[in-house]
């Protein structure tokens, strides 16, 4: 234990983390930069903050204040002690609806303030796209803005008073008329009045540098406002009084289509006199699909408000009339507006991949120019990109002249980094030539501070240095930011990664087979750190259960990054830190769809576990749960299911078996079916009937051995829809599609018996060699099916997802894998595509439950929604993950997190269900979780429809 660590542990009541994991989680924010801190402290209160500052001052160690870690310029990283305010100092202290103010701690997430203000008809004006995870302290430090700044300004416009600790331990209460000013600040400003009046561009989004002009007497000598945007370099915020604004009772969204982004940019300023709440812009190269958008190559999102929906719509229609557009759309439905806004809000992550899949990075994320000059600036910006042979996708706050863009810089090679530097310098000159600010929202940090003399001149930058010295004479707070900055091309987070591809098992087709590139996908926008999900969203259930960064998708990606770097995490694939962080990953695959850059932590976890346990003894659960298909087939062949069930009902025996198998004692062992699904199929005749399309019904392990009623129901419904149902062959060599086996004597003599399996349980436990062998055997069995045009209908969503993604990505060298993956359909998809004229039975009941997380992430549920609607099953299913997640919820040490995940959305939805509601749960894990935690029977959609046929 170092002297610094020991001193901090004696001085503070909050957590002190100098371990590898704590440090690795805070090496990066959402920028291109990386710094390794000495340690992390989560203070409990202002006294703890003061104690940290005193200890660090004595040891000469810098201090960096950190909120949600979503900063894009590098200012939330540091080499000293990082203060994490999100763990304890995250409260809403109070709200005063009459005064329209709130008192907040720096670690409070913006959405929590919005939730508290909404019942009073109020809101906090600024709303960055990271509103579900960014903190008020970070917003004040960066002077954040968001999409509504044309109506409500920047964070500085909403700050009333700030409680601040200086590096030397003084407690100040900052406000107007020099309130709380440190000694020497007023004298500094009084001696530079001419410069303060003339040296700062008059822009709605001028965020760069220190806001010293707020100290002018005609501006109220507002010390609190001048502190905003100082990026933690002047003092440490411990509490803030912020103003709230009245929220419109109704809103409408006008989406205006233009031929290109320049046309949209030139039109934006002309719409401001109409008093919109937002004027946001983006071009077609940022949008994965233009479905639901009006015609055009670029769009403005213009939001209007009113006391009624009609008033808001009238204002939106006035915007449309005033705009010279290719096409337009006005949306008043809140759900439709949310869908459209998600396209815009996800842009900060989506833009990190170019349309061809290549990488793009921040660095010139948010320059701002006068709105009237935005069109000209964008044309010059595009020309500069072309001159440097770079590509970028601009979008952002067109009404404020603020542009976000990710550019395909090569930050891995020396030549690429040199180009990055040259481009940055030249673009800074272009911004200044248009009267703009290098930063219009996210601050300067390391990305732009070096270039501030180009914007302000050497004398004003020298004034910034003098102001820093007044507040922090020891240069203790976030050194290297804003004044005396580090070079913009130093400390790049990519420089520590291996240059040669890492030897891995999965194909990583979207990343060129490069595991490092896959890990680089996480740029830190931290959508995985949201404490609630909307609609059918899933990511990230383990973070919502624990609130720990290590259990978020971002946290795990950071640890994998450090594992590849080898500087902090030094034992590579054998790392216990990475293993422990991945242990609570449910492999729900939610990040594969909900993360804007499609980080696939379930695959990374399987990859890691494969290498981590190579040549070593695995946890008992990997043998018990990973090899589940083997044990279940053994029980079926020996017809010992009744014996197994009887033994499992004897509690002492079950307890011993669970302990030996690494299964948590709180779980009941699911009962095995007395008759497997395929045995029922053979007893029934084992051959397809009817004259419709042939479909091959996949007998997954769970349907086969644990819930054959689902398979029987599916056969009944599919046949009622006029389809011919077959099971996959069980003999390799001479097998016939359509009977589930083979009646050829030659085949019986020459072929080997087998059973298809997707390999899911082996993949989820990282037994990839075994998974690959099982998958190849399955492809051999499915060879006759692949020679036909028959689809493969998979009832268990997790197995369908494994066949769609894990199979071709693990067997990327076998073309049969991709062919089989392309054949996989869900139950609803099969009915929709192959029995389009069939009308399902009218169940006419309310439905509750949860969309399976793998279905949401990989398969999609549009066909299921349409089928439910056609059958009269009313209501929306919840999002999230059931928490059982295959083997996860059965493994020892996971029960509490598993139950917490179920309590996130699934169990409350079921408890609040109306009388007579059907509880839908297509996944076996979901049904098991419902039964064991709530005593509720969930049913597969096939079972509900089969019952309706009666």
Image (tube, rainbow, N blue to C red):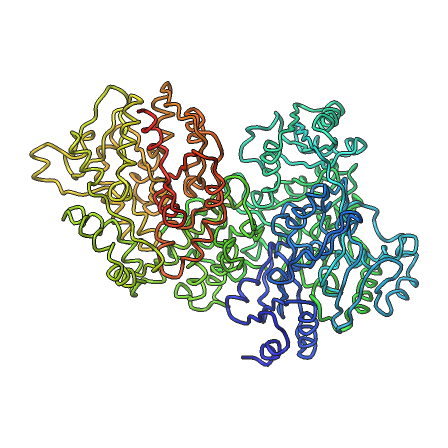
Foreground residue among 332 and 735: 332
* Residue 37 x, y percent position in the rendering: 59, 68
Foreground residue among 578 and 54: 54
User: What residue is shown at x 51% (from left), y 50% (from top)?
Assistant: 521
Foreground residue among 937 and 190: 937
* Residue 369 x, y percent position in the rendering: 76, 43
User: What residue is shown at x 31% (from left), y 40% (from top)?
Assistant: 817
Q: Quadrant of residue 307?
A: top right
Q: Residue furthest front?
A: 915
Q: Left or right: 200 with respect to 894?
A: right
* Residue 945 x, y percent position in the rendering: 35, 28
Q: How many marks are shown on the rendered structure?
A: 0
Q: Residue furthest bottom?
A: 3
Q: Quadrant of residue 679?
A: top left
* Residue 260 x, y percent position in the rendering: 66, 30
Q: Quadrant of residue 481?
A: bottom right
Q: Is residue 925 above or below residue 919?
A: below
Q: Left or right: 863 with respect to 403?
A: left
User: What residue is shown at x 49% (from left), y 34% (from top)?
Assistant: 876
Q: Is residue 294 above or below residue 393?
A: above
Which quarter of the rendering shows the N terminus?
A: bottom right
Q: Is residue 679 above or below residue 558?
A: above
Which quarter of the rendering shows the C terminus?
A: top left
């Amino acid at each position: 234990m170092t002297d610094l660590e020991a001193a901090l542990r004696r001085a503070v009541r909050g957590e002190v983390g100098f371990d590898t994991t704590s440090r690795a989680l805070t090496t990066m924010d959402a920028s291109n930069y990386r710094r390794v801190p000495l340690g992390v402290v989560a203070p409990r209160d202002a006294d703890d903050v003061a104690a940290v500052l005193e200890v660090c001052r004595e040891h000469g160690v810098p201090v960096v204040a950190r909120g949600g870690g979503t900063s894009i310029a590098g200012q939330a990283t540091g080499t000293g002690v990082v203060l994490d305010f999100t763990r304890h100092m995250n409260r809403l202290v109070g709200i005063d609806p009459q005064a329209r103010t709130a008192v907040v701690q720096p670690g409070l997430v913006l959405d929590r303030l919005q939730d508290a203000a909404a019942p009073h008809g109020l809101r906090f004006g600024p709303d960055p796209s990271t509103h579900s995870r960014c903190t008020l302290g970070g917003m004040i430090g960066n002077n954040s803005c968001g999409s509504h700044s044309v109506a409500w300004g920047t964070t500085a416009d909403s700050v009333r008073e700030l409680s601040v600790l200086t590096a030397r331990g003084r407690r100040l209460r900052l406000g107007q008329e020099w309130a709380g000013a440190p000694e020497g600040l007023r004298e500094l400003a009084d001696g530079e009045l001419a410069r303060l009046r003339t040296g700062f561009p008059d822009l709605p989004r001028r965020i760069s540098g220190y806001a010293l002009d707020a100290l002018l007497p005609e501006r109220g000598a507002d010390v609190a406002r001048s502190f905003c945007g100082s990026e933690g370099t002047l003092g440490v915020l411990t509490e803030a009084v912020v103003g709230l604004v009245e929220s419109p009772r109704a809103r409408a969204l006008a989406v205006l289509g233009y031929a290109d982004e320049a046309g949209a940019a030139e039109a934006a300023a002309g719409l401001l006199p109409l008093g919109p709440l937002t004027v946001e812009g983006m071009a077609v190269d940022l949008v994965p699909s233009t479905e639901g958008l009006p015609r055009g190559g670029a769009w403005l999102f213009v939001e209007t408000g009113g006391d009624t929906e009609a008033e808001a719509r009238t204002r939106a229609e006035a915007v449309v009339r005033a705009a010279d557009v290719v096409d337009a759309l006005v949306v008043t439905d809140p759900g439709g507006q949310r869908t459209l806004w998600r396209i815009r809000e996800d842009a900060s992550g989506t833009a990190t991949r170019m349309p061809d899949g290549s990488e793009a990075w921040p660095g010139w994320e948010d320059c701002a120019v006068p709105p009237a000059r935005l069109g000209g600036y964008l044309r010059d910006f595009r020309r500069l990109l072309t001159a440097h042979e770079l590509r970028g996708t601009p979008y952002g706050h067109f009404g404020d002249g603020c542009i976000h863009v990710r550019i395909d810089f090569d930050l891995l090679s020396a030549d690429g980094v040199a180009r990055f530097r040259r481009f940055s310098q030249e673009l800074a000159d272009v911004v200044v030539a248009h009267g703009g600010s290098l930063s219009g929202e996210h601050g300067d940090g390391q990305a732009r501070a070096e270039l501030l003399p180009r914007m302000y001149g050497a004398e004003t930058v020298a004034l910034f240095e003098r102001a820093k010295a007044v507040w922090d004479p020891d240069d203790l707070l976030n050194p290297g930011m804003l004044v005396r900055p580090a070079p913009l091309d130093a400390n790049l987070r990519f420089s520590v990664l291996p240059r040669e591809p890492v030897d891995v098992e999965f194909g990583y087709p979207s990343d060129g087979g490069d595991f490092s590139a896959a890990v680089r996908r996480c740029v830190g926008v931290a959508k995985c750190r949201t404490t609630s999900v909307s609609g059918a969203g899933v990511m990230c259930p383990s973070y919502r259960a624990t609130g720990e960064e290590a259990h978020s998708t971002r946290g795990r990606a950071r640890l994998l990054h450090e594992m590849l770097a080898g500087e902090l995490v030094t034992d590579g694939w054998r790392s216990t830190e990475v293993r422990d962080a991945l242990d609570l990953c449910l492999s729900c695959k939610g990040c594969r769809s909900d993360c804007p850059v499609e980080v696939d932590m379930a695959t990374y976890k399987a990859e890691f576990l494969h290498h981590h346990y190579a040549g070593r003894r695995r946890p008992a659960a990997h043998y018990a749960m990973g090899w589940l298909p083997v044990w279940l087939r053994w029980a079926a062949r020996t017809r010992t299911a009744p014996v197994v069930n009887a033994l499992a009902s004897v509690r002492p025996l079950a307890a011993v078996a669970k302990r030996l198998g690494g299964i948590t004692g709180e779980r009941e062992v699911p009962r095995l079916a007395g008759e497997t699904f395929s045995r029922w199929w053979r007893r029934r005749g084992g051959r397809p009937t009817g004259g419709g399309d042939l479909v091959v019904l996949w007998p997954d392990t769970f349907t086969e051995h644990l819930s054959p009623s689902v398979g029987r129901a599916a056969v009944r419904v599919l046949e009622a829809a006029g389809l011919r149902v077959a099971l996959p062959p069980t003999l390799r060599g001479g097998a016939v599609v359509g009977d589930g086996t083979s009646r050829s004597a030659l085949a019986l003599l020459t072929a080997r018996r087998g059973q298809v399996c997707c390999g899911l349980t082996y993949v989820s436990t990282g037994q990839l060699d075994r998974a690959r062998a099982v998958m190849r055997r399955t492809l051999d069995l499915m060879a006759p099916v692949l020679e036909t045009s028959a689809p493969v209908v998979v009832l268990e969503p997790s197995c369908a997802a494994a066949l769609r993604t894990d199979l071709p990505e693990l067997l990327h060298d076998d073309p049969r894998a991709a062919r089989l993956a392309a054949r996989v359909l869900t139950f609803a998809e099969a009915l929709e595509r192959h029995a389009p004229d069939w009308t399902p039975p009218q169940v006419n009941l309310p439905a509750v439950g949860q969309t399976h997380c793998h279905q949401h992430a990989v398969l999609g549920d549009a066909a299921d929604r349409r089928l439910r609607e056609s059958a009269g099953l009313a209501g929306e299913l919840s999002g999230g993950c059931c928490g059982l997640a295959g083997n996860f919820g059965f493994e020892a040490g996971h029960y509490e997190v598993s139950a917490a995940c179920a309590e996130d959305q699934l169990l409350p939805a079921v408890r609040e269900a109306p009388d007579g509601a059907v509880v839908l749960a297509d996944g076996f894990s979901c049904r098991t979780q419902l039964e064991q935690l709530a005593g509720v029977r969930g049913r597969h959609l096939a079972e509900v429809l089969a019952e309706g046929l009666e």
